[in-house]
Image (tube, coloured by chain):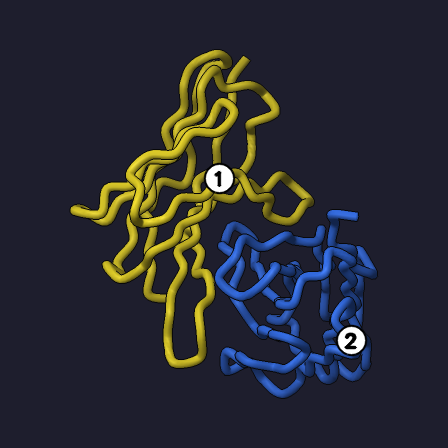
C-alpha cells in the first residue's frame, strides 16, 4: 500500500512505564486512522481510532495523537502491563476509485519487561 | 454475538489439493474481507465484499477464489496453491466499508 509506518520493529518497556508507539502515514488525504493490537496466534483487535478533525483521543489507558502537519500518529499506553505485549499496527483509511479500505503499517512489537 | 469465527484453525494441503476456508459473523456487518498475513508482516488485503458483492480483488492469483453465499458467510476456495501461499489468512467484517473491522482468529495455512 501507499502508507508506510516507521521501521521500529521492537519496543521494550518496563512494566508500569508508559509506552509510545509511532506510525507515519504518507497520504495527506487520509481522514481516519485505527490502532490494532495483535497478540500471538490471534487476529488484530481494535484498540482506538481517530478522525482527522481531531488531534487527540483517549481511551482506557490508551491515547492516540494525530499530527497532520507531519503526518504522524502515535499510540500511548499508560502503565504498561504484561498483557500489553503484542504487535501494534496503525491502519490508515485510503480512498480510491474502488472505495475506501484500510492499509496497515508495518507494525511494532511491544515487549513488556518484568 | 460480537465475534468473527473462522474454520479451520490450521490447514495443511498439497499443491494439487482443493480446500476451502470459512468465515462467519452475526453482527449484521455488510462488509467482509479476506487478508493474507505472512510472518512478521502486516495483513494485506486480498478481497472485499460489500453488501455481498465483490468490490475489490487486489490482483490476487486465480488460485484463490472468494465466495459470499450470504451476508453472514464468506468463503475462500483454494486450488493448486504454491508453497509461498503459506500464511495466516484472516477474515474480517465491518459495519460498512471505512468502519473499524473485527477480525477472526485466522486460518494458519501450510502448503507442501
Q: What residue is shown with label 1?
A: A48
Chain letter of the residue carrying label 2: B
For this view, does B85 lie left or right of residue A29? right
Identify the chain drawn in yellow.
A
For this view, does B32 lie left or right of residue A88? right
Single out the residue that lies furthest toward the left: A69
Across and down, in percent, residue B64 comes to 66, 81
Q: Colour of chain B?
A: blue
Q: Residue at x 67, y 45 (%)?
A: A42
Query: Residue B70: which disc?
Result: 2
Bin the neighbour count of mark 1 within 10 Å (Cα to Cα): few under 14, some 14-19, many 20 and up: many
Q: Quadrant of residue B17?
A: bottom right
Q: Quadrant of residue A26?
A: bottom left
B49 up-or-down from A85: above or below: below
Across and down, in percent, residue B86 comes to 65, 66
B62 up-or-down from B85: above or below: below
Amino acid at each position: 500500500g501507499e502508507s508506510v509506518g516507521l521501521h521500529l520493529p521492537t519496543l521494550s518497556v518496563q512494566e508500569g512505564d508508559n509506552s509510545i508507539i509511532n506510525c507515519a502515514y504518507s497520504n495527506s488525504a487520509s481522514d481516519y486512522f485505527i490502532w490494532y493490537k495483535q497478540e500471538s496466534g490471534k487476529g488484530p483487535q481494535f484498540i482506538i481510532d481517530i478522525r482527522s478533525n481531531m488531534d487527540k483521543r483517549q481511551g482506557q489507558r490508551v491515547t492516540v495523537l494525530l499530527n497532520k502537519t507531519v503526518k504522524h500518529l502515535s499510540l500511548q499506553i499508560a502503565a504498561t502491563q504484561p498483557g500489553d505485549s503484542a504487535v501494534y499496527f496503525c491502519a490508515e483509511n485510503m480512498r480510491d476509485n474502488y472505495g475506501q479500505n484500510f492499509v496497515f503499517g508495518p507494525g511494532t512489537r511491544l515487549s513488556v519487561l518484568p | 454475538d460480537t465475534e468473527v469465527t473462522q474454520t479451520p484453525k490450521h490447514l495443511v494441503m498439497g499443491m494439487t489439493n482443493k480446500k476451502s476456508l470459512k468465515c462467519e459473523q452475526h453482527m449484521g456487518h455488510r462488509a467482509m474481507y479476506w487478508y493474507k498475513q505472512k510472518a512478521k508482516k502486516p495483513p494485506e488485503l486480498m478481497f472485499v465484499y460489500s453488501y455481498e458483492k465483490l468490490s475489490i480483488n487486489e490482483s490476487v492469483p486465480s488460485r484463490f477464489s472468494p465466495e459470499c453465499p450470504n451476508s453472514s458467510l464468506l468463503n475462500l476456495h483454494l486450488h493448486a496453491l504454491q508453497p509461498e501461499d503459506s500464511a495466516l489468512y484472516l477474515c474480517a467484517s465491518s459495519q460498512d466499508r471505512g468502519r473499524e473491522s473485527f477480525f477472526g482468529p485466522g486460518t494458519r495455512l501450510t502448503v507442501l
